Image (tube, rainbow, N blue to C red):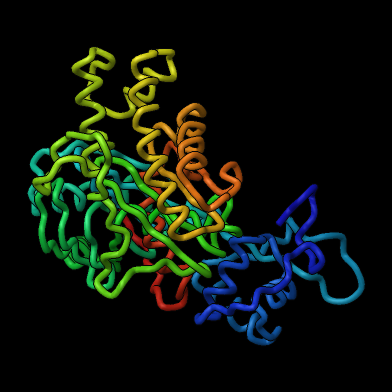
Amino acid sequence: MIEGGRTTRRGDLPPAGARRSRDSAGAVLRAVLDHGPIARSSVARVTRLSAASVTGLVGSLLERGLVREAPEAAGKPGIGRPHVPLDLPADGPAVIGVHIAVPRITVSLLDLRGRIITQAQEPHGRTDPASVITAVAARITAIRRRHATRRRILGLGVATGGWVDSPHGTIVEHPALAWRDVPIAAALAELTGLPVRADNNSRALLRGELLFGEVAGRARESAVHLFVGNVVDVAFATGGAVHQGPRSASGAVAHLPVEGCREACACGRVGCLQAAVSERVLVRRAMAAGLIDRPEIAALVAAAEGGSAGAVALLRERARLVGRAAALLLDLFDPEVLVVAEAGTNQLPESLATVRAEIAAWSSAGADVERVVRPSSFPGTVLAVAGGAVALDQIYASPLEFQVRLHAS
């Protein structure tokens, strides 16, 4: 990477880890993501691959446009053959991300560093699967036509709440949308011609944190991700690998009991975590109190930022409940990083402070909460990043398996 106008050298890089990627091309591409612009010799050191292997793999990645040579980042010429660093192309291949939330869809275009090129949100008309999938496909077509005519689209990632069977691309159950056994990946692959991968909110966003989050290096040791929106779910990873479970059912915490909560849950019980902290419940209470004039969590956060004591109180109450749940996760997994992706925690310092205070009060792990507990690395773009991260994770895992596709308008 360039620090003070120089390219990363051998001595600047962290020691090579003991763990080697099962896909050597993926290891090379991730080294460029982490350290680019970076010399080939430094890539070999980071990945623990031979110089000859790196040369061959870099050639394949260059052919596919996944990396580029960056002569502008080279140091002063010296004796012998000049070393031309490698970097990711800012205007190169991209992925499309789709997030299906309870009230809306979000479709985005992301580059290889996870940066959002463009995004569009659209409220649901009808919420049956066929109608939503048709709307998603139409939005993808519009983004391709307007923004991706010169970009090679590598794949499509889908993120949503509920139980998602990622290997089979199926939304097994999404109670808030009343969906069951929806083959979302196959349906969108047929409509778009793209390879499609689907996952749930927390696993999707944890993949983003591991790839390009603010504390990605620490998160690759071990990490837990708690997503709180209209649905609540959890993901955890060790050694950079996100746990799925044999049925892709890991991370189901929506129905953890919350003491003193009488909110009815879709499961038929009262006092479930998801019912207590969901955005729909919070927004409903805010509307009833006259704190906001539109039923959106963003409106409540904006009111709190504008000084509304009532809005701050509602978000603080939610943060306390989220913090208590997070304390349980911290004790259960003892991660290097615990990421809380919740609207207030992402945007308001006081909400983050409340979450951390509750974790410190309720956890017995003795962790340094200021260091361990982090808000999302994507505070204003959580939904836009989620789907894209699912696709990017696949690309960085096995980049040479993807056929680069150029889509014309």
Coordinates of residue 35 in the picture (x, y in percent): 66, 61
Coordinates of residue 111 in the picture (x, y in percent): 47, 54
Q: Residue at x 43, y 56 (%)?
A: 206
Does residue 144 sit above or below 76 in this rendering? Answer: above
Q: Looking at this view, is 301 or 362 the one in front?
A: 362
Q: Looking at this view, is 46 or 132 the one in front?
A: 46
Asked which quadrant contains residue 75, the reply is: bottom right
State the quadrant of the N terminus: bottom right
Does residue 186 sit above or below 342 in this rendering? Answer: below
Asked which quadrant contains residue 158, the reply is: bottom left
Q: Residue at x 46, y 37 (%)?
A: 358
Image side of residue 112 versus residue 41, left or right: left
Q: Is residue 13 visible in the rendered structure shown here?
A: yes
Q: Is residue 140 visible in the rendered structure shown here?
A: no
Q: Looking at this view, is 315 or 111 the one in front?
A: 315
Coordinates of residue 295 in the picture (x, y in percent): 22, 25
Q: Looking at this view, is 360 or 207 the one in front?
A: 360
Residue extending furthest right? 79
Q: Residue at x 10, y 59 (%)?
A: 180
Q: Residue at x 49, y 54 (%)?
A: 209
Coordinates of residue 225 in the picture (x, y in percent): 42, 53
Does residue 395 sit above or below 19 in this rendering? Answer: above
Counting labels gives 0
